[in-house]
Image (cartoon, rainbow, N blue to C red):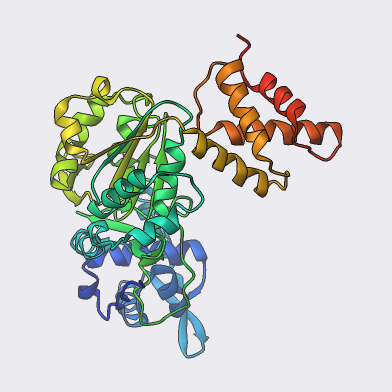
Amino acid sequence: MTPAKIAITRSIEETGVRKNLLEDLALKIIYLVGEISLLELARQMGLSYKVVEELFQRLRTDQLCQVTGMTGGTHRIVASSGGKSRALELLAQNQYVGPAPVSLEDYVARIRTQSVLDNRITPDDVTRAFADLVLDHKTLHQLGVAATSGRGIFLYGPTGTGKTTIAETLTRLFDQDPVWVPYAVEVDGQIITVFDPVLHQRLEQSADPEQDGRWVKCRRPRMMVGGELTIEMLDLQFNSGTRFYTGPVQMKANNGVLIIDDFGRQRVSPEELLNRWVVPLDRRIDFITLAGGKKIEIPFDLLVIFATNLDPAKLVDEAFLRRIQTKIKVDYMKPDQFREIFRRLCERHKLGYEPVMADELIRLVEQEYREPLRACYPRDILQQILWMAQYRQKEPTLDCKALENACQNYFLAL
């Protein structure tokens, strides 16, 4: 489903952002570019030509810019000497020079309009999304219901059973439902950047003069954090050099999925995370704090997936577990599931599959190395065979000897 276009604003008042902030932003861009047409300035600011022309007239009246010529019927301008001095003062206060921000009110309204709770998911969608994985019907049903709820999910169970892969695959359910993400949000004259070209997947869109350029059409956000997660990453991050804010991870993940991988092994303790997110998980709103101490309310509209190989009951208390609406145990593989994973991987790597080889691997894992059947073993063992063939400069072959050598390399000797 394609999200409705956000109509471009026709006046400064319609932007929802204070006039002085837009004038300051325009002057900084003019100063840094050197010479720019009003059309190009409008493109860089994501605003309509009419709004930029209004800003230009105000800057010209204040003798902060001057006209150098015309291009295609539009003015080309540069900063005046007074404008350059003013721009340097503004850059010392705030170095943000990207597209104009949207207002907090517009941001909140947009997040609610494209809520993850409104994503329509069917059993067929789940079957297609997880076609590459070998999962039982019960687990697929649980995942589909959890994704429909838009609430938290606990994926727990022994290591190597595919929890992270399941969490990443779950995000496919949101691929066909794009959303609009703002470049930045303005709050009390402060700018908070939201769009991150590394984390957000921009969708191709043709230049549309009627589309508000302050918003980017993206896939629903899909973010993963692991052991690097700190308590500071859950609040606004103020850069003392650029003097503007970066939104926290949950703000960047709004309308999408946030995966907390290896939960319990982060630099932030489960207790700290509980205290920080107990309200957001329950009420779906979050409070973030500006440097001066002012708190602002934003939506907490995301599906949070906690993946851990630790015992959830020992990690967090009942209050936290109650707010995670779905708990799914991802356990060891049954022999038939293990064989199916092995068969698919053999076909993918063009290794002649024979059922007897799958049985031999199961025997080696369970009897020789006294290990349970983990979902990761077929992939890891076959990778060992491919590496050995590459090292020997030979075509990989799948036989008992190759499996035995791969297992010797992979498992600890008993």
Pinpoint residue 103: horizontal percent, then vertical percent.
Answer: 23, 62
Question: Looking at the image, which residue is at 26% across and 19% down?
Answer: 314
In the picture, measured across the screen, residue 18 lies left or right of residue 179, that is left
Out of 83 and 8, give the one closest to the viewer. 8
* Residue 95 makes an appearance in the image: no
Out of 384 and 119, give the one closest to the viewer. 384
In the picture, measured across the screen, residue 170 lies left or right of residue 271, that is right
Which residue is farthest bottom?
A: 73
Instruction: Please say if 377 is above or below 53.
Output: above
Question: Looking at the image, which residue is at 24% across and 74% down?
Answer: 12
Q: Quadrant of residue 279?
A: top left
Question: Looking at the image, which residue is at 35% across and 50% down?
Answer: 94
In the picture, measured across the screen, residue 124 lies left or right of residue 279, that is right
Q: Quadrant of the C terminus?
A: top right
Out of 304 and 192, give the one closest to the viewer. 304
Q: Quadrant of the N terminus?
A: bottom left
Which residue is farthest top?
A: 414
Instruction: Please say if 24 is above or below 396.
Output: below
Pinpoint residue 186: horizontal percent, then vertical percent.
Answer: 26, 57
Question: Looking at the image, which residue is at 71% across and 23% down?
Answer: 404
